[in-house]
């Protein structure tokens, strides 16, 4: 009992006798307001805790020997599939015949209905480009005349065309463009009396580089560019200049914590059987020296990949875009209307992480909210009580 009696001396919350306290209406109002404020602030803190914090860092892109995946879905309401071609060229001199991918064309009616797939295949040209052409049966007579009849019929019925799919290109600067360059001049001039009537109005439903991740923004998705001939607008060449930024998205990675960084470093060191030799540096050294440690090294690499997959790493790309339009001025090879996408890769890689908030940090903020509201409401109640007493004394 002596110890407990001495322990009471450390009580910071002195309890007054019941007959020394009294409840007031103003105190009840302040208390209710304080409870409501505590609940609202607690919900805000809870929402913040449950929402991962997005952290963005920058670094140098060291990616080698990887292909760039381009996802494309765009519609040309004024051009039939029979005359549209998609060409892809890059700065390395690689041609589309060397690049994997799959693209399709879909016929669209004047009312927007899907008329069916337009059968196409790739053929190799000296310039090394993708060419969408109608497959021809062996021995079919006069293919050019029949092709002209198809184009004229599609133009008369105001057919459009949708191009969608994906392709893989080298990770170097390049371009791909949709145009009528695959057609001979005679066909174009007979179907279109003026070059300005080659309508390259288009809707870009999707244009992305690589995979998607939560919150990813592709600025050209849903972009519509129409040419109004009734208002005297001329057709021409659209050029979209794209700056592609390699991006790595990591889901659920905790960043900014010293303990997490130490645990990760220790885990990597243990996986290679030593301390102070992170696995990434060791693997890089092995690749540089051209040496191999056999099956043990393969097992360690598999461990690294499994840890990467657990973190949910997605390698993709973001891009920015600027647009330039040049009106067509007569029949010429360089003046035919087209839509160009000219892309260049940034040497900087962006790392995006969704870092979960610390539970301890959440508890600290909740305690701060509750304590702060309690202290403020207490002071407010005392001020109101003193003001009421002063007014009562004056009236007396």
Image (tube, grey):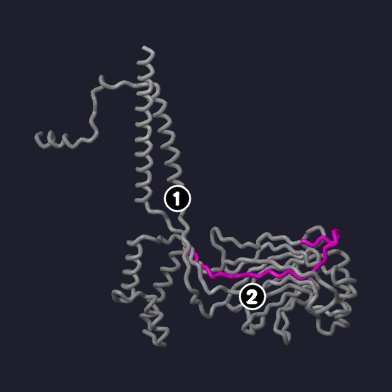
> Foreground residue, 260 or 194?
194
Q: CA distance from mark 2 to mark 1?
A: 39 Å
Which residue sits at x=87%, y=77%? 187
> Foreground residue, 384 or 172?
384
In the rendered structure, the answer to whether residue 393 lies left or right of residue 336 reads left
In the rendered structure, the answer to whether residue 346 lies left or right of residue 128 reads left
| Rendered-image quadrant of the C terminus | top left
Residue 176 belongs to magenta span: no
Which residue sits at x=23%, y=31%? 14
SS state under label 2:
strand
Badge count: 2
* Coordinates of residue 274 in the picture (x, y in percent): 29, 76
Q: Earlier in the sequence, mark 2 or mark 1?
A: 1
* Coordinates of residue 365 in the picture (x, y in percent): 37, 46
Q: What are the residue bounds of the magenta stretch?
A: 226-249
| Residue holding disc 1 | 50
Residue 243 belongs to magenta span: yes
Which residue sits at x=37%, y=15%? 394
- Observer able to see residue 134: no
| Rendered-image quadrant of the N terminus | top left
- Observer able to see residue 9: yes
Nearer mark to the viewer, of 2 and 1? 1
Q: What numbered label is drawn on residue 101?
A: 2
In the rendered structure, the answer to whether residue 184 lies left or right of residue 264 reads right
């Amino acid at each position: 009992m002596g110890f407990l009696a001495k322990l009471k001396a450390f009580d910071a919350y002195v309890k007054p006798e019941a007959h020394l306290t009294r409840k007031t209406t103003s105190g009840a109002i302040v208390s209710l307001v304080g409870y409501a404020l505590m609940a609202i602030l607690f919900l805000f803190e809870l929402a913040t805790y449950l929402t991962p914090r997005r952290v963005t860092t920058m670094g140098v892109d060291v990616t080698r020997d990887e292909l760039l995946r381009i996802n494309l879905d765009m519609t040309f309401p004024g051009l039939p599939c029979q005359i549209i071609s998609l060409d892809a060229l890059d700065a390395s001199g690689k041609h589309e015949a060397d690049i994997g991918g799959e693209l399709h064309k879909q016929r669209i009616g004047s009312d927007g209905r899907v008329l069916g797939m337009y059968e196409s295949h790739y053929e190799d040209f000296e310039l090394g480009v993708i060419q969408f052409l109608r497959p021809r049966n062996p021995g079919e007579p006069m293919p050019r005349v029949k092709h002209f009849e198809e184009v004229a019929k599609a133009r008369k019925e105001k057919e459009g065309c949708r191009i969608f799919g994906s392709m893989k290109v080298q990770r170097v600067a390049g371009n791909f463009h949709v145009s009528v360059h695959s057609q001979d001049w005679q066909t174009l001039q007979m179907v279109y009396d003026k070059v300005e009537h080659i309508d390259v109005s288009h809707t870009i439903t999707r244009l992305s580089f690589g995979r998607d991740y939560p919150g990813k923004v592709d600025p050209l998705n849903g972009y519509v560019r129409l040419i109004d001939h009734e208002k005297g607008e001329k057709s021409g060449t659209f050029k979209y200049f794209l700056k592609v930024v390699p991006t790595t998205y990591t889901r659920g990675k905790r960043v900014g914590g010293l303990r997490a960084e130490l645990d990760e470093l220790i885990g990597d060191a243990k996986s290679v059987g030593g301390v102070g030799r992170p696995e990434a540096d060791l693997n890089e050294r092995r690749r540089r020296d051209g040496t191999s440690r056999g099956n043990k090294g393969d097992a360690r690499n598999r461990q690294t990949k499994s840890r990467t997959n657990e973190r949910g790493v997605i390698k993709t790309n973001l891009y920015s875009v600027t647009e330039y339009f040049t009106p067509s001025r007569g029949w010429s090879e360089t003046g035919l209307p087209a839509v160009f996408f000219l892309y260049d890769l940034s040497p900087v890689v962006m790392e995006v992480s969704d870092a979960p908030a610390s539970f301890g940090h959440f508890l600290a903020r909740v305690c701060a909210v509750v304590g702060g509201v309690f202290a403020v409401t207490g002071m407010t109640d005392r001020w109101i009580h003193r003001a009421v007493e002063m007014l009562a004394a004056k009236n007396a």
